[in-house]
Amino acid sequence: MKKQKKDPLYKSFGYAFAGIFAVVTKERNMKIHCVAMVCVVIAGFVFHITPVEWCICLTLFGLVMALEMVNTAVEAVVDLVTKERMPLAKLAKDAAAGAVLIAAIMAAIAGMIIFIPKLLESLSI
């Protein structure tokens, strides 16, 4: 049996960017995450957050958005496999959505830890 030749690396990147574009344009929750990211970036510039704080914010953006894409993939595969209501299909979808929710809640808490003191400091000038 012949081994199938892999696509060139540039094509792999093209597929990945197509996936990102598809999720950003089609998924409401990803649009919400993108708006939140833009707001945090603006707040980061306004409040002059430290490089470590930027790294925390960027890591959390990546985590939440990557999990949202995995959630979308899980939902698509489950929908492809069955249209029936099945307990395992529900578990797969709910677990993937729960992973995004946990990451988003933790990111919001980290954001509050970073930004609330800076906001309070700027108000007490």
Image: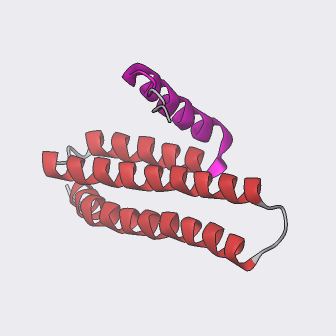
102 lies above or below 124: below
- Residue that protrudes farthest toward the front in the picture: 1
41 lies above or below 121: above
The one nearer the camera, 55 or 91, is: 91
x%, y% of residue 18? 55, 29
x%, y% of residue 67? 47, 56
Indicate yes or no whether the magenta region holds residue 50.
no
Identify the residue shown where x is 52% and y is 36%. Answer: 20
The one nearer the camera, 118 or 25, is: 25
51 lies above or below 74: above
Q: Which residues are magenta?
A: 6-29
x%, y% of residue 50? 15, 48
The one nearer the camera, 14 or 101, is: 14
Image quarter where the C terminus lies is bottom left
Which image quadrant is residue 64 in? bottom left
Identify the residue shown where x is 65% and y is 48%. Answer: 28
- Residue that protrudes farthest toward the left in the picture: 51
- Residue that protrudes farthest toward the bottom in the picture: 87
Indicate yes or no whether the magenta region holds residue 26.
yes
Relative horizontal placement of residue 19, taking residue 40 as reference (left or right) = right
Tell me how the rendering is colored. Answer: secondary structure
Relative horizontal placement of residue 20, taking residue 81 as reference (left or right) = left
Relative horizontal placement of residue 52, taking residue 82 as reference (left or right) = left
x%, y% of residue 86? 77, 75
Identify the residue shown where x is 23% and y is 57%. Answer: 118
